[in-house]
Amino acid sequence: MACHQETPVKSCKIILGCALLFFSTTCIGSEAINRLNKFLTEIDSFQANFSQTVWDENNKLVQESKGTIALNRPGEFRWQYEQPHGQLILADGEFLWVYDPELAQAYTRPITQALGSVPIMLLTNPRELHEDFRILVMSDKQEFSWLELIPLIQDTEFNRVRIGLDELGIRRMELYDNFSQKTAIEFTHMIVNVRFPEGYFNFEAPSGVDVVGYSE
């Protein structure tokens, strides 16, 4: 299934699930936790490339996509799909935007409403991870330290999230949904504490684009 065919809500749940991990902190001890805390407390912003794969319940690859991510604390991020189809998911601190250039449509809703249906904190009011997740320390594998996060609220699309960390910070994520699908995301070419140009996290719909869900 191509990325641009996903519903805005499902796409946002994947991205918002990721965003939680970059805007939260916790104090439970372990090498993985220490790496996560170090990464979160020492950066205010970052940018990276990402590759994303989706696997079905039979472990069959059903989707591949690539793009770039940029985050700026607190509450701003820009997740840009570039392959195989373009799509932009952007949080400007007040609204969450999903823009599909092929459909010439942009979907938006207030951040508070967009986050209300998923088990994560508001990006503009971050809480500690252990307030929303049960945190399990996993065995190291593939040169990464791993954590597993299980939402305390179980009526959500993703029932667990695994985070792989190295000495530089978060490098891999695996999100498992209630249909036994796995979404795997890998971050490369990461640059931290980036100073983004003014307006980088603002969205202005191009001429002719239909905007759904926003009123002045």
Image: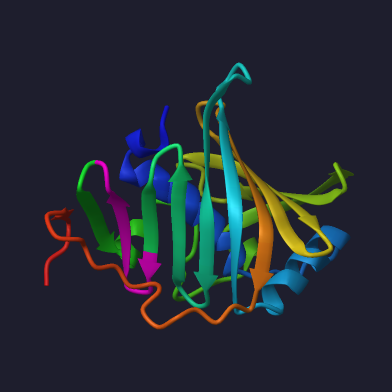
Estimate the x, y position of residue 139 in percent, counting from the top left: 87, 44
Q: Quadrant of residue 89?
A: bottom left
Q: Quadrant of the N terminus?
A: top left
- Residue 89 as seen in the image, left or right of residue 66: left
Q: Is residue 71 above or below residue 98?
A: below
- Residue 170 as seen in the image, left or right of residue 94: right
Name the residue at 24% across, 53% down: 107
The residue segment tinted magenta is 91-102
Name the residue at 48% across, 52% down: 15
Residue 116 seen: no
Chief secondary structure of the magenta portion: strand
- Residue 102 as seen in the image, left or right of residue 78: left
Name the residue at 86% across, 61% down: 30
78 or 157: nearer the eye? 78
152 or 116: nearer the eye? 116
Q: Is residue 36 above or below residue 118?
A: below
Estimate the x, y position of residue 146 in percent, counting from the top left: 79, 49
Q: How is the image coloured?
A: rainbow
Q: Is residue 42 magenta?
A: no
